[in-house]
Image: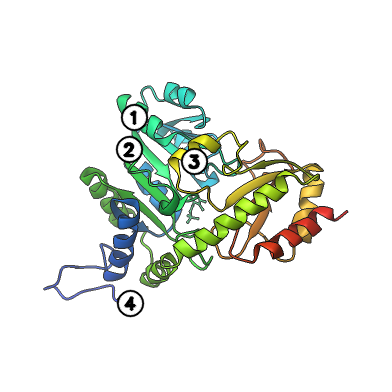
Amino acid sequence: MNVPVPFSSIYRADGDIAYGRDGNAAWEAFEEVIGLLEGGSAVCFASGMAAISAVLETLPAGAKVVAPADAYSGTRRFLADAAARRRLSVQLTDVGDTQATLGACSGASLLWLESPTNPLMTIADISALCDGGHALGASVVVDNTFATPLLQRPLELGADVVVHSVSKFLSGHSDLIMGVAVTRDPGWLDQLRSRRSLHGGIPGVLDAFLALRGVRTLVLRIERSQASASELARRLDTHPEVRVVHYPGLPADPGHALAARQMRGFGAMLSFEVAGGREAADLVCASVKVCVHGTSLGGVETLIERRQRWAGEESLPPGLLRLSVGIEDVEDLWSDLEAALATR
Ligand SMILES: *Cc1c(COP(=O)(O)O)cnc(C)c1O
């Protein structure tokens, strides 16, 4: 039933696979499942960043990329580095504003999207941006890490490539780092496979096995985490110590109507701003006992962190806390957060 993990770098010359950097049965089993979930062909990588850099490294020197101003910090750092070396020209935009984003796309080779964005949970109109971007000659890539293919299928909305950090919801147990890119376009598929072989950003076979094991419970984890996230967002929204909650599932959230159309659920990520600002937010992080104070997301445990503590995140409100909701009992999470918010 389970795919045997091929601990072999070499293969006998009469088989399909010559060398382990080009393919193996453990990757193929994982790629088959992710390809089916996203509706395309998947290529797995050593990390989300390896998948992201493989996509961006397909671009010719001097190509223009339009990306979210609040994209994943690693993607932003990659683009800033490429811009500093004049490899790429980069324009950052608010992807929640379709007109402004398409305005930035003239002359662009690639439009990079995330939705919901990190950590302000902005919703981008993926199908309008794919149509508009394509009309301007740009390929469109969506980082679907926050939503997962269970809640959002960007290839169906017109995207050329979807990327994921498998380290997050897909594997789901905070025990490995891996990435994947998915496409329906044979040209892109070819490019992605050759980037992986040329750059060598390949995952280990055991990680591919563990990631596939994680994916088997994705639907259960997402259902549970999403239900809890929605309940916590609702309660935080009326809490006197909370200034604002960013969660597309809240009816008053600016992205609510679009997310309701575009997604099959609002996900397990949310952020909220503590009224007392930076000190109060730090106190919440130091006081939680059920939630874990730490970065990253998408695991079975609930993670909380103050995003503005990171370099490159200075423009965020100092009191903004990001919550990746896990699978614990929602009442345990709520009493933990309530007690932490009451700490003086
Ligand atoms: C974590 C993350 C990445 C990077 O993935 P790694 O597996 O850590 O390299 C990319 N995009 C998003 C949205 C992420 O959360």
Q: Residue at x 29, y 76 (%)?
A: 8
Label 2 – label 1 distance at C-alpha: 7 Å
**Labels 2 & 1 near each other (Cβ < 8 A):** yes
For the residue pair 51 and 258, the one nearer the viewer reads as 258
Q: Which residue is mark 4?
A: 2
Within-10-Å neighbours for mark 3: few <14, some 14–19, many 20+:
some
Q: Which residue is mark 1?
A: 131
Q: Which residue is mark 2?
A: 158
Q: In the image, what residue type sits under mark 2?
A: Gly
Q: Quadrant of the N terminus?
A: bottom left
Q: Which mark is residue 260?
A: 3
Q: In the image, what residue type sits under mark 4?
A: Asn
Label 3 – label 4 distance at C-alpha: 36 Å
- Residue 237 visible in the snapshot: yes
Among the two numbered marks 3 and 2 on one chain, the one whose residue lies closer to the N terminus: 2
Q: Residue at x 19, y 68 (%)?
A: 18
- Indicate the quadrant where residue 245 lies: top right
- Indicate the quadrant where residue 159 lies: top left
Does residue 205 sit above or below 321 in this rendering? below
Label 1's element? Answer: helix
Does residue 167 sit above or below 93 in this rendering? below
How many numbered marks does the figure carry?
A: 4
> Mark 3 or mark 1, which is nearer to you?
3
